[in-house]
Image (cartoon, rainbow, N blue to C red):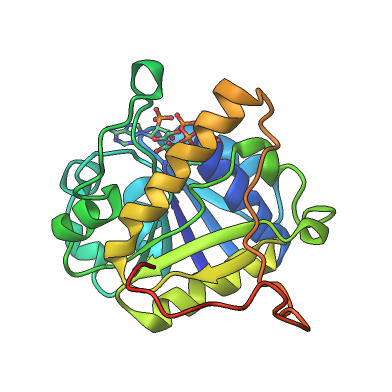
Amino acid sequence: MKIGIIGSGNMGRSLGILWAEQGHDVFFGARDLEKGKAVAEAGHGTKGGTNDEAAIFGDILLYTVRGVNPAEVFSSTEVLSGKILIDCNNFDIPEGFAFPPIVQSLAEKLAAEVPNALVVKAFNTMAQEVFELAPTPLKDYEVSVFVAGDDSQARQVVMSLAKDIGFAPVDCGALRNARMIEGVGDFIRFLLISQLQNPYTTISVNTLPPAQQQRLGGRQTSNLH
Ligand SMILES: NC(=O)c1ccc[n+]([C@@H]2O[C@H](COP(=O)([O-])OP(=O)(O)OC[C@H]3O[C@@H](n4cnc5c(N)ncnc54)[C@H](OP(=O)(O)O)[C@@H]3O)[C@@H](O)[C@H]2O)c1
């Protein structure tokens, strides 16, 4: 697939290199043309240049520019028409990790700013350090990537990109659910920065085999969930 990286910092550089290693065509974009070119020196046939060039190049774009309206990043947002725009962003961490409730996710804000693009939330619930383990030994640990977006085909594409680099994608349905996924992003950062102080802290969703017997009486009728 042709992937354009918008902002080639920690997330853009890491994911771009991983996808290029898997045979995808990757273009690193940056505000500064020379920076984009420098990141492309990572090899694997990657190219580098401006964010405009990356957006034109990619059918799938990784948007790592937190909270900035694409109208300020590109000469024209027309370039995003019909493209899959992966939003990996998390809100800034407030004092004492006192996150306010999320009433509009960053992904929904992005989708409202560029209604012509297919925005998909993903890759916001693990630290950069985890990408350093990809695709092996990462794939042995089944680390979840939560994927939400209103276009089901776009979600499938992003899920396959997550799988390519050793993650276990979880289909989370509509883009509105990015509010919960960003909440998980806040929670994991609270855990890994404040509590465990270990950037290799991850979340894996497991579905267990059903119990052979319901010796506790099983689930009884209740109005509570
Ligand atoms: N790092 C992690 O472990 C991690 C994990 C999960 C999610 N995230 C989320 O991913 C997002 C990116 O994080 P990061 O660690 O990659 O940050 P980063 O290393 O600081 O990279 C951010 C990128 O955004 C670009 N940028 C900033 N303001 C811009 C603007 N006004 N116009 C155009 N480009 C702009 C920067 O370009 P310049 O280089 O030109 O300044 C840089 O390439 C954040 O929302 C973060 O919360 C990060």
User: Residue 149 location, x and y as percent?
Assistant: 34, 70
Q: Give the side of residue 9 with respect to residue 16, left or right.
A: left
Q: Give the side of residue 113 with respect to residue 198, left or right.
A: left
- Quadrant assignment, res 214: bottom right
Tell which quarter ligand 1 is in: top left
User: Residue 158 location, x and y as percent?
Assistant: 50, 69
In front: 31, or 66? 66
- Quadrant assignment, res 100: top left
User: Residue 38 location, x and y as percent?
Assistant: 57, 35
User: Residue 206 location, x and y as percent?
Assistant: 67, 66
In front: 161, or 52? 161
**Residue at 23 percent of width and 53 percent of height:** 110
- Quadrant assignment, res 98: top left
Confirm whether residue 24 shows in the render: no
**Residue at 66 percent of width and 26 percent of height:** 196
Indicate whether 42 appears above or below 112.
above
Classify the position of the N terminus by image quarter. Answer: bottom right
Number of labelled discs? 0
Indicate whether 75 appears above or below 154.
above
Q: Give the side of residue 120 with respect to residue 209, left or right.
A: left
**Residue at 67 percent of width and 38 percent of height:** 201
